[in-house]
Structure formats: structure tokens, C-alpha cells
Amino acid sequence: KIDVKHQDVQQKTQVGAILSAGLNLERLPHYMRSNMKEYLDNEYEIVYIDLPFYLSYDDIEDYYGGTPANMAAIKLIVDKSNKIIEKVLDSSNYETEQWGVINPPTSRLLSRPVQMYMAAMMKHPDVLASFDRIK
């Protein structure tokens, strides 16, 4: 007899759905990039528009599986990037004091703070530079 609690199954299902959504989000762009590179490389320029993402030092250590040797250099880059994000959020209607900095999920969970974060990031200098390249 298998004794599984409903909550355990529900959590595993939601985690699976989030992971699946993350993988599916990348499939089409990857296919299009490889297709364009192979067949249309001389005709089109691919411009990436990435959502600026606030990082913590824990995020970096998790990514590398520990503290990388060049952590001091990485911290300078992360601090600069995070300060730009904070400045953009402060100049928008985003309520930093109430919400903190919320990194949007790649799935179905689009709350009001996430929507406000995404709207604010449309004014991020890197995003604006990508838009200018497209023009």
C-alpha cells in the first residue's frame, strides 16, 4: 500500500509544471535562433531582450555550486546591475518598501507585484538599448 499525502502530490505536480514551463519557454526561442543562424544569418540581426533579474550572492553560489574564485569581480558586476534595477523600480510605481524586489516566475504566477516589476523593467537601460537596436 502506498501512503501519499495529497499535499505532497500537489507540490510535486506544481514543481513539475513550473519546470516544464521553464523548459518549454526556451524551446521556441532556441529553435528560432538556430534556424535563423543557419539560414538567415546574413539577412537578419538577432536582438535579445531579456528581463533584468535581481541577483543575490546566494544565487551566484547556487549557480556555481559554491563560491567561485573570481567572486569579488562577480560581486562588482552584480552590485552594479542590482543598483540599476533598484533605481528603475524607485522611479516607477513599483512599491519596493511593501514588496521588496520580486523576481518574476517563469510560470503561471503573475501577481500584481510581478506585473509592476515587469512594467518597470521596460524602462531599464539595457531593455531600452535593445529596443533602440531593433528600430
Image (cartoon, rainbow, N blue to C red):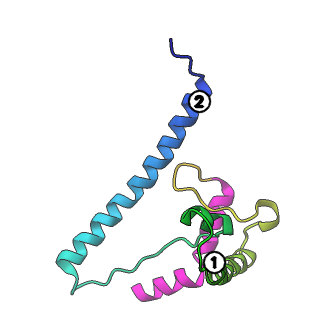
Identify the magenta region: 111-135
Can you identify the residue that label 1 sits on? 71
Which label is found at residue 99? none
Q: Give me the residue at 61% from left, 68% from top.
A: 60
Q: Give me the residue at 54% from left, 83% from top.
A: 126
In the figure, is residue 47 to the left or right of 65?
left
Q: Main secondary structure of the magenta part?
A: helix
Q: Nearer the viewer, residue 11 or 89?
A: 11
> How dense is the environment of label 1, judged by Cα within 10 Å: few (below 14), some, or many (20 and up)?
few
Task: Name the element at disc 2.
Answer: helix
Marks 2, 1: nearer the viewer = 1
Task: Name the element at disc 1.
Answer: helix
Q: Nearer the viewer, residue 70 or 123?
A: 70
Q: CA distance from mark 2 to mark 1?
A: 37 Å
Q: Quadrant of residue 122?
A: bottom right
Can you identify the residue that label 2 sits on? 8
